[in-house]
Image: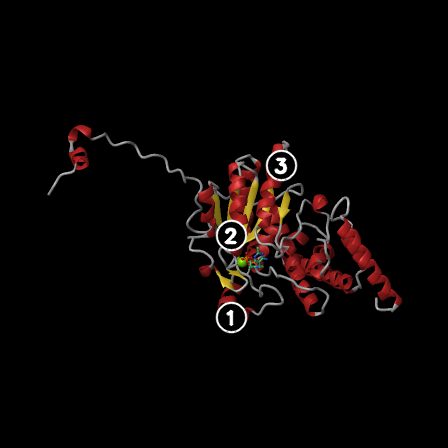
Amino acid sequence: MTTTPQAVRRASPRTRRPATPAAPDPSAGLLPQTEPVRLLDPDGTPLPPRDDYPEPPVEALREMYRRMVVGRRFDIQATALTKQGRLAVYPSSRGQEACQVGAVLAVRDTDWVFPTYRESMALTSRGIDPVEVLTLLRGDWHCGYDPAERHTAPQCTPLATQCVHAAGLAHGEAYQGRDTVALAFIGDGATSEGDFHEGVNFAAVFKAPVVYFVQNNKYAISVPLSRQTAAPSLAYKGVGYGVPSEQVDGNDPVAVLAVLTRAVEHARAGHGPFLVEAHTYRMEPHTNADDATRYRDGAEVEAWRDRDPIARLETYLRARGVLDDAAVAAIADEAEAYAAELRDRMNAKPTVDPLSLFDHVYAQPTPQLVEQREQVRAELADADEEGER
Ligand SMILES: Cc1ncc(C[n+]2csc(CCOP(=O)(O)OP(=O)(O)O)c2C)c(N)n1
Ligand SMILES: [Mg+2]
């Protein structure tokens, strides 16, 4: 056997170095806990309190319950409106109420929210008029509400593009000395999109105050999570960009609010972005136009029915003595009245002016737009003359 010079050097006692102390783990504080944070058992029994995620005040939890009940009723009503031809399409967030409402409660009214098409419930829970929220899904060309006034971006259909918008807005706000936080919703499937990675990376490098809130509802239309990613959990996607992350039981309202509150505080304090993955489940098909029985098992859906976030919070609040039959009935009545008013208003024929489509594209319309506007105006005049409108 020949001995190489390197082997000699390795073996030589003269070149042996004293053991160096282990370098600090650069991923410390970035990785999520191995189990999703949970403060209530699925049956509503409280788990031992923990220092890292203190329980939110009970008034906030009671308000969360109220908004979740009204939110679910809104969601059911919106789904019914698609069947009555009053709404073109509706992506339900039934089963995700803790995430939808928890996110809105964790931020201030002056913070910005960047929703996807699935977040109608979050927006109504933020106090935006439900008819305005459904404007886009009704088939109009605009989002219905004033984003600047509501600090809420339009609901985003191109997957993950809002991640980049949120990073830009948050960076701009910080640059101007304001302590605004941006919360970007995103789905499990959309974390495979380039814009998610670009947004998170930009926010991390510039320490932009963004909370990336991944609702892992287990499906991207028909694609299950197992075909979406080989990551141990979506929360692990933060570490590669230097972003601290956490995973939470998304059907535990108390834990969702506690984790998001801490994430928002982290961002507001100037420590940069934070990524939260909530494990939840999409109870309904992707939209009313989808048939989920073609790709998932009814038993799976039934198993998630037992982890209902509203029942879980109700059990807990009743046990704490801050919710009783009368309060539950009053909130149910409020939800019914909310849905009835929405139904009536959506049944009224909308007044739309197709020409308004051209008004806000450019400050100075291009010659092509002027021409197209004239074409539409002439067609509408013809239709009016023939009584077709
Ligand atoms: C860039 C882009 N690619 C594809 C689509 C089509 N599309 C719409 S929803 C969807 C699934 C997204 O799933 P996920 O991110 O998990 O969100 P969820 O619908 O479950 O809330 C896809 C692929 C799209 N809207 N945008
Ligand atoms: Mg999904």
Label 3 belongs to which residue? 172
Q: Nearer the viewer, residue 27 or 34?
A: 27
Q: Three-letter amino acid code at disc 2? A: Thr
Distance from disc 1 to disc 3, alpha carbons, whole Å, reads 46 Å
What's the amino acid at mark 3? Gly
Q: Residue furthest top?
A: 14
Is residue 107 in view from this perspective?
Answer: yes
Give the amino acid type for the residue marked by disc 1 in the picture.
Answer: Gly
Q: Is disc 3's CB within 8 Å of ligand 1?
A: no
Task: Name the residue tied to disc 1.
Answer: 298
Disc 2 designates what residue? 191
Q: Is mark 1 on a helix, strand or loop?
A: helix
Residue 257 lies, in percent from the top left, at 56, 48
Local secondary structure at mark 2: helix
Q: Any atom of ligand 1 within 8 Å of the CB at mark 2?
A: yes
Residue positioned most to the right? 385
